[in-house]
Image (tube, grey):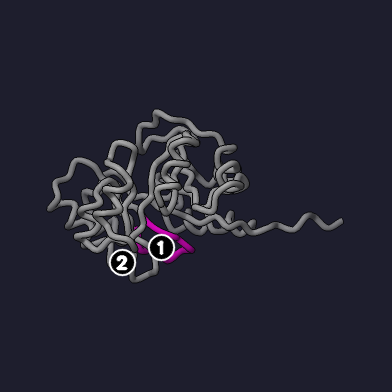
Amino acid sequence: MWGKPEIPTNSRLYLITPPNLEDVKTFSKTMISALEAGDVACIQLRVKDLDDDALCRIIDVLRPEAQKRGVAFILNDRPDLAFETGCDGVHIGQEDGTYAQARNAVGPNAIVGVTCHDSRHLAMIAGEQGADYVAFGAFYPTTTKEASHHADPGLLSWWSGLMEIPCVAIGGITLDNAQPLIEAGADFLAVSAGVWAHPEGAAAAVAGFNRLFKGE
């Protein structure tokens, strides 16, 4: 008896850089290999405790490599620098200023994504204001960033059934636990350690996520 055919999904990969990039040239090589291993929608630069000059130097190394491969380059927290350095957009948290401030800084054509934690209310507000995507999480425990909110996959199903604005699932996502989020309707899976710390390397992880998205 033939088994049920695998059905491809509409999910895509949204990479987030490691929080510490002490050797950006070495990381750039790793990033390039990952971006060339399969479909990646975007990569977000999320590093902390750097002055603007240091942050701009990292952007100048990584942004062109992403953009020349058709991958959007998103900066975390800093709409002003995102605009000044030619990034494709910015991701803001609930403590990083308002959507309106971010939009004014980056202009009408850039991407503005908004963290909404596990809140339907915050997501509805972000969507009504014009956010290009809303991010829910954390769905799983994560060592990359301290998570004070914990979301359920049902939140993704609710949002995707109601709104056309894409939703991003974030928080501790790996190849081993991604399937429920894909099935729940996540448009993007935001992954950091699940790619960069994969035992077979970042490129193998990206290829693995793409197989999941294709239903293989």
When the figure is inspected, residue 12 is found, relative to residue 173, above or below; the finding is: below
Q: Residue 76 location in percent, x, y?
A: 30, 48
Question: Seen in the image, is 215 located left or right of residue 67?
Answer: right
Which residue extends farthest bottom? 68
Q: Residues within 10 Å of mark 1 (few under 14, many from 20)?
A: many
Circle 1/circle 2 CB separation < 8 Å: yes
What residue sits right under mark 1 in the picture?
35
145 or 154, nearer to the observer: 154
Residue 65, which numbered label? 2
Spatial separation of the CA atoms under disc 1 and disc 2: 9 Å
- The verdict on residue 37 being magenta is yes
Which residue is located at x 33 percent, y 67 percent? 67
Residue at 74% over, 58% down = 5
Q: Give how far across and how far down residue 77 sits, in percent.
A: 27, 45
Q: Residue furthest top?
A: 148
Asked whether, in this view, residue 115 is left or right of residue 3, the answer is left
